[in-house]
Image (cartoon, grey):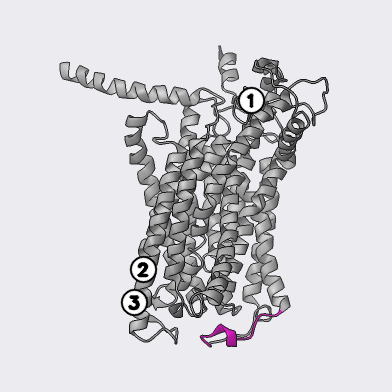
């Protein structure tokens, strides 16, 4: 009997230790292992946002760049930060595995942070100070100074490419999809994962930006570097408790084989009975800890890749599971495209929103608020919204929907997209008020500080945090949940790709709108170095319209989306347990009443 219990205690999802041995549920994984991963994320996000939150002001004040150039340098770098995870996901899934990819990338990340700290600390690595309000009159950074600074930034980007898609996936891997209790714990994992991210972000947006603005950039960048070092040490300390998944080969190669095989057999007729398609025995998948997926009617053309024609060439014949994995990744692409515009809105937090703050009265008595610290309210709103969502909203909605998540992930994303329309309408109206006060006090041409508190910008920051609680959490969970089991890292990289494309799109729109409005519209353009003479209110109104059109596109896309079938019955078990709890409660009340 004891032996049977020991056997049953092994995880059923194919996870192993670093040596490739099966792992006992009681020894590895679960919330104990996740605690190291979550603590790592707090410190790492503190490091990343300690750099990115105030970067636009460093580029303006220290490297003497204008509004459009500094904002675009920030969004181009942040875009790269979020795009490199595709490469990291490939390396993890195809070669090194998630753990070793993460460990190697974290040291690349750390080296970039160290060089970046040196570049802001040593006087020869930055141009001489300039107090002229017009940065065009200041000495520009030399080629060497720019090479060291941006070289360090992009080294950091390469490092995050390996850490970002794998760390959240490592955390999610600590829960067994075939164990109902652990499956339920995973439902809350992504909410608390985002909580840890924004907790680290809150520290960066308050304490670190204050240090950078009022103490110095050396300490302001040195502390995030130290924080990153601590976070890597914490992650490594949790190694004995992690569950791991073996690399399953390049997901890109597997997908390419399916597409090529289907195209090469485009004239072949697909049999009516899916059982006639090529597939391995269920036992073969079970022994390898993998999942077999049954054929589905969606994207039917790709089923041709599994039609038997006498050739066993992997570029001519693929299993049904390979075909279905490819379908799952391709089905998510339209959803991915709908998230690009909201990600562009997020890019405004650390660029134009911060630049707006520099024009306003930032004093509370003798204390001067750093403009970038308002991003802390995004974090606070996010933290509060996630807790309220997880503790109250989900419980209320479960009674109506019988869905363990309360509402579907796509419904949650849709609510977040509605928030983004409201955000940009609000931002446009607030900017119109700011410009009217500037005009009233004759500050349009001089670009002087407007006698209006910086807290008028608060609504757009708070609403952004509320939107993140819906859209960003759901987006991360959706792409992880809907990705095939063997392509989870690639699935997670979809969510980071969304942010990357959003930032590049922000750079494109900012440059294009600035150029077009300067040449063909407003007599000097909508976006100038002098924000008091600009028209960001028009720019934000343009964003509101863009978000509305994107929401309509999202509704069209989700109408045709088919959710991935569960590979285990644990979600159904959870749903049944929820029903049982609701049925049990009234009967318990009756019993209490009779007693």
Q: Position of residue 484 (x, y in %)?
A: 62, 33
Would residue 47 be counted in the magenta stretch?
no
Chief secondary structure of the magenta portion? loop
Q: Sequence order check: which comes first, mark 2 or mark 3?
A: 2
Residue 190 in view of the camera: no
Q: Sequence order check: which comes first, mark 3 or mark 1?
A: 1
| Residue 554 against residue 362 in the figure, above or below | above
Residue depicted at x 43% and y 79%: 532
| Label 3, residues with CA under 10 Å away: few <14, some 14-19, many ≥20 | some
Of residues 314 and 24, the one drawn nearer to the viewer in this rendering: 314
Is 312 situated left or right of 38 in this image? right
> What residue span does the magenta drawing correspond to?
132-142
Mark 1 lies on residue: 291
The CA distance from mark 3 to mark 1 is 60 Å
| Residue 20 against residue 462 in the figure, above or below | above
Which is more foreground, mark 1 or mark 2? 2
Q: How many marks?
A: 3
Mark 3 lies on residue: 452
| Residue 199 against residue 525 in the figure, above or below | above
Mark 2 lies on residue: 430
């Amino acid at each position: 009997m004891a032996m049977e219990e020991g056997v049953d205690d092994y995880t059923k999802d194919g996870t192993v230790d670093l040596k490739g041995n099966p792992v006992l549920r009681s020894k590895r994984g679960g919330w104990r292992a996740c605690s190291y991963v979550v603590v790592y994320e707090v410190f790492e996000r503190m490091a990343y946002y300690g750099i990115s939150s105030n970067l636009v002001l460093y580029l303006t004040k220290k490297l003497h760049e204008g509004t459009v150039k500094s904002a675009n340098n920030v969004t181009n770098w942040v875009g790269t930060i979020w795009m490199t995870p595709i490469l990291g996901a490939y390396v993890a899934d195809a070669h090194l595995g998630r753990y070793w990819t993460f460990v190697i990338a974290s040291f690349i990340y750390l080296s970039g942070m160290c060089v970046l700290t040196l570049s802001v600390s040593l006087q020869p690595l930055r141009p001489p100070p300039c107090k002229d309000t017009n940065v065009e009159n200041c000495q520009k950074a030399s080629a060497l100074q720019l090479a060291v600074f941006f070289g360090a930034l992009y080294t950091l980007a390469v490092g995050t490419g390996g850490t970002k898609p794998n760390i959240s996936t490592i955390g999610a891997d600590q829960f067994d999809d075939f164990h109902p209790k652990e499956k339920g714990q995973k439902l809350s994992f992504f909410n608390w994962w985002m909580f840890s991210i924004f907790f680290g972000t809150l520290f960066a947006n308050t304490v670190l930006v204050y240090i950078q603005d009022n103490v110095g950039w050396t300490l302001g960048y040195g502390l995030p570097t130290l924080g990153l070092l601590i976070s890597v040490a914490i992650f490594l300390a949790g190694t004995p408790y992690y569950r791991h998944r073996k690399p399953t080969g390049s997901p890109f190669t597997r997908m390419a084989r399916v597409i090529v095989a289907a195209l090469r057999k485009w004239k072949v007729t697909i049999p009516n009975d899916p059982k006639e398609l090529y597939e391995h025995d269920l036992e073969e998948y079970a022994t390898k800890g993998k999942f077999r997926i049954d054929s589905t009617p969606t994207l039917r053309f790709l089923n041709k890749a599994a039609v038997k024609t006498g050739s066993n060439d992997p570029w001519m014949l693929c299993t049904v599971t390979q075909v279905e994995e490819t379908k799952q990744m391709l089905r998510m692409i339209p959803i991915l495209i709908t998230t690009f515009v909201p990600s562009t809105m997020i890019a405004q937090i650390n660029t134009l929103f911060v630049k707006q703050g520099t024009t306003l009265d930032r004093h509370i008595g003798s204390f001067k608020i750093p403009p970038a610290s308002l991003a802390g309210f995004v974090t606070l709103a996010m933290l509060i919204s996630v807790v309220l969502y997880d503790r109250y909203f989900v419980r209320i909605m479960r009674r109506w929907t019988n869905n363990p998540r309360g509402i579907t992930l796509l419904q949650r994303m849709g609510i977040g997209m509605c928030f983004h329309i409201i955000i940009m309408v609000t931002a446009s109206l607030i900017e119109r008020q700011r410009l009217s006060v500037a005009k009233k006090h004759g500050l349009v041409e001089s670009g002087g500080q407007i006698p209006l508190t910086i807290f008028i910008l608060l609504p757009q920051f708070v609403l952004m945090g509320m939107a993140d609680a819906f859209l960003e959490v759901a987006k991360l969970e959706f792409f992880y949940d809907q990705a095939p089991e063997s392509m989870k890292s690639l699935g997670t990289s979809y969510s980071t790709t969304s942010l990357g494309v959003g930032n590049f799109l922000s750079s494109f729109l900012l440059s294009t709108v600035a150029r077009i409005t300067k040449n063909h519209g407003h007599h000097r353009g909508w976006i100038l170095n002098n924000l008091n003479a600009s028209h960001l209110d028009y720019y934000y109104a343009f964003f509101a319209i863009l978000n509305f059109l994107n929401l309509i596109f999202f509704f069209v896309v989700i109408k045709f989306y088919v959710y991935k079938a569960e590979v285990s019955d644990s979600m159904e078990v959870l749903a049944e347990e929820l029903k049982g709890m609701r049925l049990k409660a009234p009967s318990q009340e009756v019993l209490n009443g009779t007693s």
